[in-house]
């Protein structure tokens, strides 16, 4: 993407922020969840972090439909791991969005100003690496002409990559530098250097393996979007466009990274989300109801069982241990 194109996109987004933010915020706030003061803290034990009506919340893993501890932190997308929480703050009527990095006590330790509409975020298992994806043109992966911006922050070295388009990308060993490249859906490996993400170019979508230090990305497979690495690092959960056509929706699957074996999950509805592993055997994701409210669902990662709601009226699930 040229500098002139980036400037045009940034200018266009800035003009649209004030027009669209009210409607966008209204859609984000349509959950009828109770006010924070009305909710009791969850029981002790493993917890899940979610967004309840846009507020960062936690709930007991074994009673995920039960009482929630709701904070005053407002996010459009959130993820937490290793004592670090990444909060993509909402675009307001008179302000752009930002990435807020929170510590284990949910105190703000770093912010990064962003231009665009929050879409995805992930934190590495150690809490060191933070990634995010924004829509800067269009609001759907199924739309023609959409454009995304995906960045990564290394909290240990303070290295900031504002766009993965800065990295050298190869598909089947050939360098790809097309202006239509878009990246989204980062997930990190345990070494805090390698990661996986989706790249689209020429109407195709690829699973890419990235090397943060080397600033490179290479293709591994096609029709893989929003990858999420399993706790043991051997599989990814992802969404795949039906018949390679995002306008027909997506189905959830897992892929064994060593063998390439694909397992279709029991969820047959279209899922436009980056899945999250709740544990080694369970994949969670958000689905929006007809009334605009999101629920967190989960399904076994081996293709068996049936989908079930684990946290009603919530989205952006992340296991906390």
Image: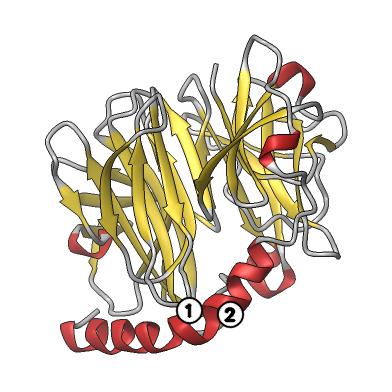
Marks 2 and 1 in Cβ contact (< 8 Å)? yes
Answer above or below: position of 179 versus 234: below
- Asked whether residue 152 appears in the rendered view, the answer is yes
Of residues 193 and 156, the one drawn nearer to the viewer in this rendering: 156
The residue shown at (28%, 90%) is 8
Give the position of the N terminus as an image quadrant.
bottom left
Q: Which residue is mark 1?
A: 146
Q: Secondary structure at mark 1?
A: loop
Answer above or below: position of 182 versus 112: below
As drawn, which residue projects farthest toward the front? Answer: 37
The residue shown at (83%, 59%) is 289
x, y percent for residue 110? 25, 43
Label annotation for residue 237:
none
x, y percent for residue 75? 51, 51
Of residues 230 and 105, the one drawn nearer to the viewer in this rendering: 105
Name the quadrant containing residue 213: top left
As drawn, which residue projects farthest toward the top? Answer: 45
Q: CA distance from mark 2 to mark 1?
A: 6 Å
Label annotation for residue 143:
2
Q: Secondary structure at mark 2?
A: loop
Answer above or below: position of 138 versus 268: below
- Asked whether residue 219 appears in the rendered view, the answer is no
């Amino acid at each position: 993407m040229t500098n002139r194109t980036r400037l045009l996109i940034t200018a266009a987004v800035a003009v649209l922020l004030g027009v669209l933010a009210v409607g966008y915020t209204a859609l984000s706030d349509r959950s009828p969840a109770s006010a924070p003061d009305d909710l009791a803290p969850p029981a002790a034990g493993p917890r899940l972090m979610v967004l309840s009506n846009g507020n960062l919340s936690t709930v007991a893993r074994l009673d995920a439909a039960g009482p929630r501890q709701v904070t005053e932190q407002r996010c459009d997308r959130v993820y937490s791991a290793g004592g670090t929480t990444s909060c993509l703050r909402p675009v307001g009527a008179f302000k752009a969005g930002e990435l807020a990095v929170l510590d284990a006590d949910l105190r703000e330790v770093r912010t990064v100003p962003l231009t665009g509409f929050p879409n995805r975020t992930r934190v590495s298992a150690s809490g060191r690496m933070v990634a995010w994806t924004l829509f800067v043109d269009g609001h759907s992966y199924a739309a023609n002409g959409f454009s995304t911006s995906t960045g990564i922050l290394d909290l240990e070295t303070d290295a900031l990559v504002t766009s993965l388009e800065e990295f050298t990308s190869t598909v089947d060993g050939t360098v790809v530098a097309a202006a239509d490249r878009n990246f989204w859906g980062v997930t990190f490996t345990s070494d805090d250097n390698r990661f996986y993400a989706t790249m689209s170019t020429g109407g195709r979508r690829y699973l890419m393996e990235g090397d943060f230090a080397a600033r490179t990305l290479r293709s591994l497979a096609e029709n893989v979007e929003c990858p999420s690495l399993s706790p043991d690092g051997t599989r990814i959960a992802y969404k795949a466009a039906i018949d390679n056509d995002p306008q027909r929706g997506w189905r959830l699957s897992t892929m064994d990274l060593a063998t390439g074996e694909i397992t279709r999950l029991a969820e047959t509805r279209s899922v436009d989300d980056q899945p999250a592993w709740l544990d080694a055997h369970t994949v969670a994701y958000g689905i929006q109801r007809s009334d605009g409210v999101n629920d967190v669902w989960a399904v076994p990662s081996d293709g068996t069982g049936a989908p079930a709601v684990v946290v009603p009226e919530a989205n952006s699930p992340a296991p906390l241990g």
